[in-house]
């Protein structure tokens, strides 16, 4: 249902897992510094292979200056709206992002949406591609369950700097915010979520296939939303702050 063979060798999948772990620890490292890291831990990998695998994983390093060649269409880029904004209620700001998920065999991608005020994960989806349609589906389902947000914040990836994404939010009268290039903190809440997902679940219990990943994430997000206290919200649980009527 979810998993398809990705055609990568066992060695490449192993290298991708190491790249993913390294990127969480060093998000500013690009292709060359990642290649150096791999060399230091015993993997002799060409620059072209590192570049290809990083692109396949959907990873973008954080660094100053524009890099439009890795974005979608520049005409769809929107300004960052969260600077100096007081976020003080649920559904005021949602953050969305996509991350690579390594498994025992192969890999998948996880798209998730987090409410900035409460840290409540309002939607998520596992897929085998990085298409923008997956992001739209997650937003639609989250709005159906919880109502629409005032602002949705994302990075400037091609999934979000495209006509279909912009039109989807504009038609719902949702404001569109995008991270500034070279700013690691603009979408910090969902970056922290990825660290928690991977360190507390994926790396400890690598799922054997898409079904196991789906089941594991259901349990993880249930715990994350309703049982886990968060220091960033005064050691409360996300569900304690995210108390709004269901849109259904």
Image (tube, rainbow, N blue to C red):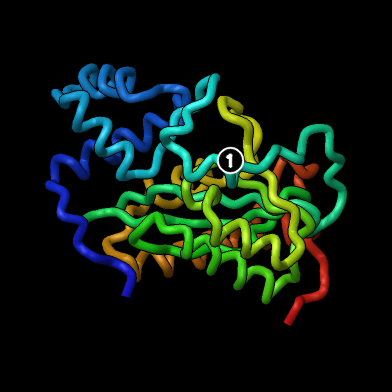
Q: Which residue is mark 1?
A: 192
The quarter of the picture where the C terminus appears is bottom right
Local SS, label 1: helix
Q: Residue at x 45, y 25 (%)?
A: 26
In-front residue for pair 187/155: 155
How far from the left and from the top, in percent, is residue 124?
54, 63
In-front residue for pair 164/15: 164
- Which residue lies most toward the bottom here? 248
Horizontal side, residue 17 vs residue 44: left or right: right
Question: Residue 128, can we see it?
Answer: yes
**Number of numbered discs on residues:** 1
Horizontal side, residue 146 vs residue 2: left or right: right
Question: Residue 119, can we see it?
Answer: no
In the image, is residue 11 above or below residue 45? below
Q: Residue at x 66, y 47 (%)?
A: 153
- Which residue lies most toward the front here? 75
Residue 108: quarter of image: bottom left
Horizontal side, residue 248 vs residue 13: left or right: right
Q: Residue at x 21, y 40 (%)?
A: 14
The quarter of the picture where the N terminus appears is bottom left
How far from the left and from the top, in percent, is residue 154?
60, 46
Task: Check disc 1: other Cα within 10 Å, few if <14, some if 14-19, many if 20+.
Answer: few
How far from the left and from the top, in percent, is residue 77?
60, 42
Q: Residue at x 51, y 65 (%)?
A: 219
How far from the left and from the top, in percent, is residue 47?
21, 24
């Amino acid at each position: 249902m979810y998993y398809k063979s990705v055609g990568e060798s066992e060695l490449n999948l192993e290298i991708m897992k190491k790249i993913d772990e390294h990127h969480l620890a060093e998000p500013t490292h690009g292709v060359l510094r990642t290649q150096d890291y791999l060399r230091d831990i015993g993997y002799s990998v060409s620059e072209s292979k590192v570049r290809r695998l990083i692109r396949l994983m959907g990873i973008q390093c954080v660094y100053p200056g524009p890099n439009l060649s890795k974005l979608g269409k520049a005409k769809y880029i929107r300004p960052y709206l969260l600077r100096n904004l007081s976020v003080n209620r649920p559904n005021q700001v949602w953050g969305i992002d996509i991350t690579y998920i390594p498994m025992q065999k192969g890999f998948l991608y996880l798209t998730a949406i987090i409410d900035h005020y409460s840290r409540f994960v309002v939607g998520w989806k596992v897929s085998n591609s990085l298409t923008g349609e997956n992001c739209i589906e997650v937003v639609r389902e989250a709005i159906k369950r919880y109502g629409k947000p005032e602002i949705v914040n994302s990075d400037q990836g091609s999934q979000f700097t495209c006509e279909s994404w912009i039109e989807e939010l504009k038609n719902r009268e949702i404001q569109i915010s995008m991270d500034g290039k070279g700013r690691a903190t603009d979408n910090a809440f969902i970056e922290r979520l990825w660290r928690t997902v991977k360190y507390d679940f994926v790396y400890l219990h690598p799922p054997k296939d898409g079904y196991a990943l789906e089941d594991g994430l259901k349990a993880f997000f249930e715990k994350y939303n309703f049982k886990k206290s968060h220091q960033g919200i005064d050691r409360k649980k996300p569900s304690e702050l995210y108390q709004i009527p269901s849109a259904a």
